[in-house]
């Protein structure tokens, strides 16, 4: 007798890998950011802005923020899956979560490229 | 059928007041709570980041916000959330690589996570917020 639990193929594994890949990106950025801020010691607007005007830091900061949003998607979705049992409400929470995170990504672009 | 037999023989303890979460378990639930907390504070943090970069005037107002006692407490809490999530996350990555999976090592590493994340929070909080 086949008693199979229905789940999408590799869908868990893909998220498991992405959660760790984004974690490593964020961890590396955290160290870079702390070293840069420690070295620059930005106590003025110009010095603070200068950090993110630098091409590498702009790119790295954007990569960091996108990693935050994707990582948050997987983590928050897992929280809904653990605690929200009614299917309709769970779906609604997931859609709302994805929607705000996509919005934040657009906001991040605006912050970094229109500064 | 074999599965059923195993399930029946499992010991049960549902006397909730006597169940104490071990330190790695406390670390785990704080990992989740800190993640959820940081997710909820993302709009505030993005707004603060935007203000700090948009213009000298908004930079000054962002600095004023950060100087407010309530904001300081929230930001100190968020720094701790970040540092806990960061250190506990590194511990989980090491566990993924089968490093420190034995009981004693896992308990020790969770103590290290609490010590390091609280120390980093105090150092960064002192530098940035005071």
Image (spheres, grey):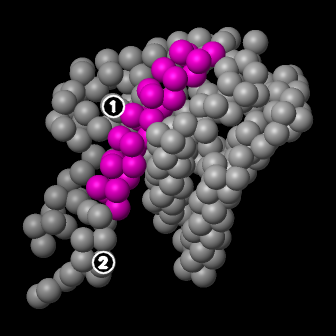
Residue range highlighted in magenta: A15-41
Secondary element at tag 1: helix
Marks 1 and 2, how far apart at CA? 29 Å
* Residue drawn at (51%, 54%) of the image: A66
x then y, percent, for residue A40:
59, 18
Q: Residues within 10 Å of mark 1 (few under 14, many from 20)?
A: some
Residue B45 appears in the figure: yes
- Number of numbered markers: 2
Q: Is residue B52 magenta?
A: no
**Magenta stretch prevailing secondary structure:** helix
Asked if both marks, 1 and 2, belong to the same chain, the answer given is no
Residue furthest to the bottom in view is A1
Any magenta on residue A24?
yes
Task: Point out which mark residue B91 bears.
Answer: 1
Question: Residue B65 versus residue A5: which sits nearer the camera?
Answer: B65
Question: Quadrant of the rendered structure where residue A49 is?
Answer: top right
Write down the quadrant of residue B124 in the picture. top right
Residue visible at 33% across and 49% down in the picture: A21
Is B37 displayed left or right of A7 in the figure?
A: right
Where residue A54 sits in the image (x, y, percent)?
55, 37
Q: Nearer the viewer, residue B62 or B22?
A: B62
Task: State the residue position of label 2.
Answer: A7
């Amino acid at each position: 007798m086949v008693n199979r639990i229905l789940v999408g193929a590799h869908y868990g594994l893909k998220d498991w890998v992405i959660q760790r890949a984004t974690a490593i990106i964020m961890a590396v950025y955290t160290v870079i950011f702390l070293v840069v801020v420690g070295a620059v010691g930005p106590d003025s607007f110009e010095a603070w802005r200068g950090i993110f005007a630098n091409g590498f830091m702009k790119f790295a900061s954007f990569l960091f923020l996108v990693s935050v949003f994707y990582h948050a998607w997987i983590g928050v979705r897992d929280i809904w899956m653990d605690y929200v049992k009614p299917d309709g409400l769970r779906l609604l929470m997931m859609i709302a979560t994805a929607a705000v995170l996509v919005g934040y990504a657009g906001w991040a672009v605006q912050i970094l490229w229109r500064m | 059928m074999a599965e059923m037999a195993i399930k029946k023989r499992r010991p049960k303890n549902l006397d909730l007041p006597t169940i104490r979460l071990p330190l790695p378990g406390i670390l785990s639930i704080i990992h989740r709570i800190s993640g959820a907390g940081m997710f909820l504070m993302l709009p505030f943090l993005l707004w603060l980041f935007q203000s700090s970069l948009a213009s000298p005037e908004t930079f000054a107002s962002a600095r004023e916000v950060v100087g407010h006692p309530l904001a300081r407490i929230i930001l100190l809490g968020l720094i701790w959330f970040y540092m806990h999530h960061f250190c506990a996350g590194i511990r989980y990555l090491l566990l993924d690589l089968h490093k420190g999976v034995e009981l004693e090592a896992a308990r020790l590493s969770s103590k290290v996570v609490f010590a390091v994340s609280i120390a980093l929070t105090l150092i960064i909080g002192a530098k940035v917020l005071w």
